């Protein structure tokens, strides 16, 4: 009898392992939702042109969204661990689509903060945090590869959705473009979450992993042998080290994704050429995610993450000096390759260090740093630009922040949960 490929208990001998369907669903969800978020930069100047709002004020919308996401994502992760990833992700999709659709009706600045900041922030856990937490639970030995494939959706979304939004803005205006993005989220992410997201049965995953050939990564063999609860993880030094690494790296990404297009336009690039930078960044991040996932399965996640942070810091210094089209596209290509692995490696390190028993809650708590970094980076750059007329100081600050993240990565202990030093032992 032919195997049911949508049966979570389907194994390799019976058909396609269901975990790969979860990877595919996560790929699509990440592509649509993160692509929509990364499109904010292409709305920046058209909205500013209509209302005359400052760059600081518009950047504050990203901060409002980041803070709302930071407050929401730990709860979303806890709810997913308790009630399942499918209903929580579906609800998040409905809320996020509503937020983008309502942005098309903005008439005053408080509405933009409410719709693009708070409502979209409430639905934001559907991107990255929820799908990648679930993917990590479906895989052990090929976890890096699975996370890499799922997260390449982010690159595909960054490569396509901002250009699509730019075309719609040029043809129909920014309001129609915002409404389209809301509808796109509803008609893709909501049904996909209901159909293809399932929590794994540990026995099924374990049985399959025993049939897979061993890898050289020493951490895979110890994965999920022990697990910490969220409260226990919060007491470890490694949690807060990961938190700082995540926040500082996304601080860089938030600034780049929000202000790269306006900065390129300021130097004379056309709207389409400037929007193409986000597409180039997204395309190259696909290769970065896949390579980082594959390499980390063999040598561990920490050295791959450290290399990426080093390159990102160097490229921020490059951006501070470039003013040519080729220089911008070189930045987009290399930053895409280097930052692409961050979203793969942080959840992988989370599962290795803390186990999978409370993966949703712990990675959700770590994702608070994601929200804070993505919100504060754009706000800082917008404020500095309004005060100085330049982004140069912002780029140097981000390079310094990435140097701190690199140092924290080199100091990180990648041992599993029982070996983790407690905060009380370090500071008490």
Image: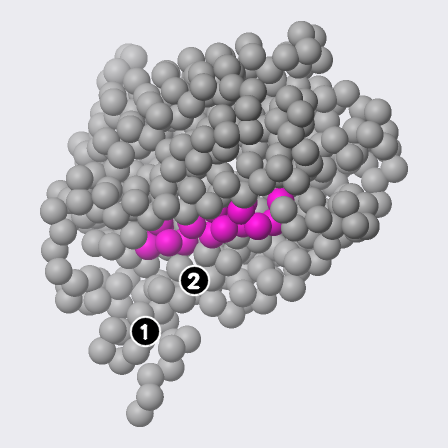
Q: Which residue is mark 2?
A: 24
Instruction: Tell me residue 276's x, y (percent).
Output: 58, 40
Q: Is residue 382 left or right of residue 147?
A: right
Instruction: Tell me residue 194's x, y (percent).
Output: 54, 67
- Residue range corresponding to the magenta coloring: 146-162
Secondary structure beneath dot 2 equals: helix
The residue sitting at 51% across, 19% down in the picture is 322
How packed mark 1 is, by other alpha carbons closer than 10 Å (few <14, some 14-19, many 20 or more), is some
**1 drawn magenta:** no
Instruction: Tell me residue 29's x, y (percent).
Output: 52, 55
Figure quadrant of residue 192: bottom right
Decide whether the magenta segment is chiefly helix, strand or loop: helix
How packed mark 2 is, by other alpha carbons closer than 10 Å (few <14, some 14-19, many 20 or more), is many
Viewer-proximal residue, 79 or 327? 327
Quadrant the N terminus occupies? bottom left
The residue sitting at 20% across, 67% down in the picture is 207
Q: Is residue 62 visible?
A: no
Secondary structure beneath dot 1 equals: loop
Residue 394, compared with residue 355, is above or below; it is: above
Q: Is residue 215 left or right of residue 257?
A: left
How far is the residue under mark 2 from the one under mark 1?
Answer: 12 Å
Instruction: Tell me residue 78's x, y (percent).
Output: 47, 46
**161 drawn magenta:** yes
Q: Look at the image and name its color scheme.
A: one colour
The residue sitting at 14% across, 51% down in the picture is 215
Figure quadrant of residue 245: top left
Q: Is residue 250 left or right of residue 231?
A: right
Residue 281, compared with residue 317, is above or below; it is: below
Residue 208, compared with residue 36, is above or below; it is: below
Label 2 vs 1, first from the N-terminus: 1
Q: Which residue is mark 1?
A: 16
């Amino acid at each position: 009898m032919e195997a049911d490929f949508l049966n979570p208990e389907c194994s390799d001998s019976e058909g396609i392992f269901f975990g790969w369907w979860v990877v595919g669903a996560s790929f699509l969800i990440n592509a649509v939702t993160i692509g929509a978020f990364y499109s904010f930069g292409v709305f920046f100047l058209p909205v500013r042109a209509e209302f005359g709002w400052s760059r600081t004020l518009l950047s504050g919308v990203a901060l409002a969204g980041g803070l709302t996401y930071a407050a929401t994502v730990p709860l979303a992760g806890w709810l997913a661990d308790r009630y399942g990833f499918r209903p929580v992700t579906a609800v998040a999709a409905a809320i996020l689509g509503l937020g983008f659709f309502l942005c098309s009706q903005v008439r005053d600045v408080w509405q933009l903060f409410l719709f693009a900041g708070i409502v979209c922030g409430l639905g934001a856990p559907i991107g990255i945090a929820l799908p990648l937490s679930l993917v990590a639970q479906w895989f052990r030995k090929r976890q890096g590869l699975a996370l890499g494939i799922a997260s390449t959706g982010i690159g595909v979304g960054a490569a396509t959705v901002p250009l699509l939004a730019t075309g719609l803005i040029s043809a129909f205006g920014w309001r129609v473009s915002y409404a389209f993005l809301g509808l796109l989220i509803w008609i893709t992410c909501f049904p996909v979450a209901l159909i293809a997201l399932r929590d794994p049965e540990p026995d099924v995953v374990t049985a399959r992993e025993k049939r897979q050939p061993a890898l050289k990564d020493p951490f895979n063999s110890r994965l999920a042998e022990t697990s910490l609860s969220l409260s226990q993880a919060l007491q470890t030094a490694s949690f807060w080290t990961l938190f700082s690494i995540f926040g500082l790296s996304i601080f860089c990404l938030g600034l780049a994704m929000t202000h790269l297009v306006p900065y390129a336009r300021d130097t004379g690039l056309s709207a389409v050429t400037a929007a193409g930078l986000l597409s180039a960044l997204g395309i190259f991040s696909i290769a970065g995610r896949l390579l980082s996932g594959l390499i980390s399965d063999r040598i561990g996640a920490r050295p791959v993450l450290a290399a990426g942070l080093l390159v990102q810091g160097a490229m921020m210094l490059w951006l501070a000096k470039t003013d040519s089209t080729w220089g911008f596209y070189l930045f987009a290509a290399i930053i895409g390759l280097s930052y692409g692995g961050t979203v793969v490696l942080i959840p992988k390190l989370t599962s290795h260090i803390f186990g999978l028993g409370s993966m949703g809650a712990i990675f959700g708590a770590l994702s608070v740093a994601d929200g804070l970094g993505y919100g504060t980076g754009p706000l800082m750059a917008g404020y500095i630009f309004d005060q100085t007329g330049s982004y140069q100081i912002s780029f140097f600050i981000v390079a310094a922040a990435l140097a701190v993240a690199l140092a924290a990565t080199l100091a990180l202990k990648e041992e599993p949960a029982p070996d983790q030093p407690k905060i009380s032992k370090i500071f008490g």
